[in-house]
Image (tube, helix red, strand yellow):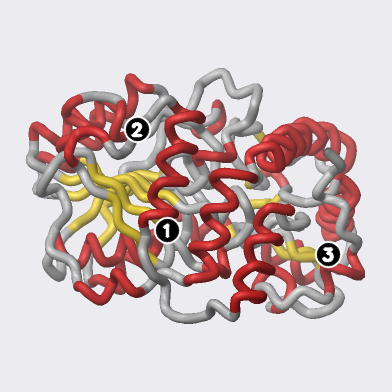
Amino acid sequence: MASPFDLTLEQLREHRSAKWSRVPADVLPAWTAEMDVRTAPAITDALHLAVERSDFGYAGDPAPVISAFTGFARDTWGWDPAEGGGTMRLFADVGQAAIEVLRAVTSPGDRVIINPPVYLSFYPWLQSVGVEPLEVPLLDVASGGRLDLAGMEHALASGARVVLLCTPHNPLGHVYTQEELAAVADLAAAHDALVISDEIHAPLVHPGSPTPFRPFLTVSEAARRVGIALHSPSKAWNIAGLKTAIGITATPGRWPGLREDLDWSSSILGQYAAVAAYTDSREWLGTVRAEVEQRTHQLVDLLAEHLPAVRYTPGHASYLAWLDCRDLGLGDNPAATFLERGKVALSPGPAFGIGGAGFARLNIGTSQELMTEAVRRMAAALHSG
């Protein structure tokens, strides 16, 4: 299969997506988590079919999406999410699902455990519900990161009753082991807590990852009891704007009381695309995963050549690179300097919570040429202004 990362800069400038339309024309965007990639052909065909049918009503029966996801999960991770008496339901996106579950199980002022540096949207999600982040930072970030289980136990003992877990981890790209996840489940079970497992980047675990992705609901019986898993094709197949996500429980009664109208929140085009992604776009995904893994190795070489003071530990999932820029002397938010002087947009490290000062997140889900240009602009920012 030809590389799907063959869109030119001129073609990308025509995009109306957030990544490209929310920056000035002279800025190269390498910030929000969208890839610069051609859509999987099966998804394109599915959307054409919806157009031909004039099928633009409210999203209907979720069964085709649930069936498609179940088949993908079974074939990819050996997981049958339909087993055990739990249920699956659709949402517009993972953010909506997490917010609605949090709203149902917490009260204003409650604290929710997160593990920074972590996906920057976790913070506004929590704020929108009126709860507080209880930060238990990852350990050994320079080596790829690991959970501070003792810190999480202390947080649960202090009264927190929800863990919002990012697995695989964004922005580090860390893939948790079964043992790590089972330990979290045991801690949650011991304190009667809920684990909301955001697994949106799971299909993008690299082919060479030394640790396979383990769905949280599969790691132990305790995990089945305490967990709600959230999935979506949005990141792996680059279709965030089509708005469909899947929430999964593994035991009866695990879902809290949610608003009935949420069943109407996913998009009918998202449903068409999700079925095509999970069933007929696996070869495309395999190509993307392999190329993204190549980008991590290419980035190591680029940084050594152009920005040797920047430290980077390649992750094993997704297309986001966590860059330690503290030795550049650019303060807490080096992304601001890269944008102002280099005309390249990265995500600011401080937005990812404790441990983010002096860091920036670089999106490498693009062609080698555009990634190279992004690094070149970052280096140029150090010699201007």
In the image, 299 versus 353, the foreground residue is: 299
Residue pictured at 68% horizontal, 53% vertical: 42
- Sequence-wise, the earlier of marks 2 and 1 is 2
As measured in the structure, the alpha-carbon distance from the residue carrying label 2 to the one carrying label 1 is 17 Å
Check whether the beta carbons of the residues at disc 3 and disc 2 lie within 8 A of each other.
no
Mark on residue 245? 1
Q: Nearer the viewer, mark 3 or mark 2?
A: 2
The answer to which image quadrant residue 300 occupies is top right
In the image, 315 versus 138, the foreground residue is: 315
Reading the image, the residue beneath label 2 is 80
Reading the image, the residue beneath label 3 is 342
SS at circle 2: loop
Vertical comparison of 185 with 113: above or below:
above
Residue type of the residue flagged with mark 1: Ala
Residue type of the residue flagged with mark 3: Gly
**280 sits left or right of 184 in the view:** right
- Sequence-wise, the earlier of marks 3 and 2 is 2
- Residue 262 percent coordinates (x, y): 28, 71
How packed mark 3 is, by other alpha carbons closer than 10 Å (few <14, some 14-19, many 20 or more), is: many
